[in-house]
Amino acid sequence: MTRSVSNFAAVLAAITVALVLFAAKLTNGASRTSDGPVSAPSFDAQVTGGATEDTAVFAGGCFWGVEAVYDHVKGVKRAISGYAGGNVAGPSYEQVSTGDTGHAESVEVIYDPSQVSYGKLLQIFFSVAHDPTQLNRQGPDHGTQYRSAIFFRNAQQQQVAESYIKQLTTAKTFSRPIVTQVAKLNGFFAAEEYHQNYLAQHPDQPYIVINDQPKIAALKKQFPDVWQN
């Protein structure tokens, strides 16, 4: 769906989104079995050779909110909205929005592993960035382009991600099954410039207020140890 709206259309969109979210809540209920962050991974990636930069790629619905969450994580150098998981090189937003490219709206997180670990990024992903129990949707957004996915760059990331999902499943952290895809990263394509830092530039846009600002508030509350303005 196209989320860039303004004026009267923005008001109508806000009402529509609020009704959709309310209906979804009534239908599905809360997916988390408890408040607060999910447990940290018992197995995490190891830093070798004094590395000061690594990359992780996550998909969790609209990339505006996911990007904004990681922008506020200490140790993250930059977060970039884009597309991953599909079969079209250099896709446009309009192409991805059709659901025909195989891509998911994704975020490339470039971080300093000496300050924040891959496991911590995963913990944030499952705690506040999105709901991993929603299949091919996130809130009001529907389609495979809004699926939950972790795109691993190497065998270690794959092992940590798969181990963590198994850990959360065994602990029954969520009342519904985790549907997060774990897939090899075969390319990341940055989205158009107007999608970058969208929340920071449009903090009062109705879609942002309803869907994404609560994620930022949850990050600040649940992860004060890694929070940064």
Image (cartoon, rainbow, N blue to C red):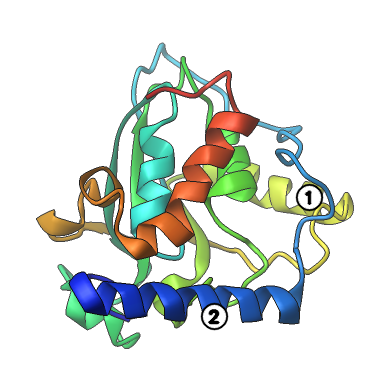
Vertical comparison of 201 with 85: above or below: above
Q: Quadrant of residue 218?
A: top right
Kind of residue at badge 2? Val
Taking the spot 54% from the left edge, 30% from the top edge, the residue there is 220
Kind of residue at badge 1? Leu
Q: Distance between the residues labelled 1 and 2?
A: 28 Å
Q: Where is residue 33 in the image (x, y as percent from the top left)?
A: 84, 54
Taking the spot 35% from the left edge, 35% from the top edge, the residue there is 71
Comparing marks 1 and 2, which lies closer to the viewer? 2
Given residues 189 and 1, the one toward you in this image is 1
Is 26 on the left-hand or right-hand side of 21?
right
Q: Can the viewer see residue 213 in this picture?
A: yes
Per the rendering, the mark at residue 168 is: 1
Vertical comparison of 37 with 202: above or below: above
Given residues 20 and 192, the one toward you in this image is 20
Instruction: Estimate how packed mark 1 is, as few (under 14), some (14 to 19) or many (20 or more) residues with alpha carbons within 10 Å.
Output: some
Instruction: Estimate how packed mark 2 is, as few (under 14), some (14 to 19) or many (20 or more) residues with alpha carbons within 10 Å.
Output: some
Q: Can the viewer see residue 185 in this picture?
A: no
Per the rendering, the mark at residue 20 is: 2
Q: Where is residue 76 in the image (x, y as percent from the top left)?
A: 37, 28
Q: What number of labels is visible?
A: 2
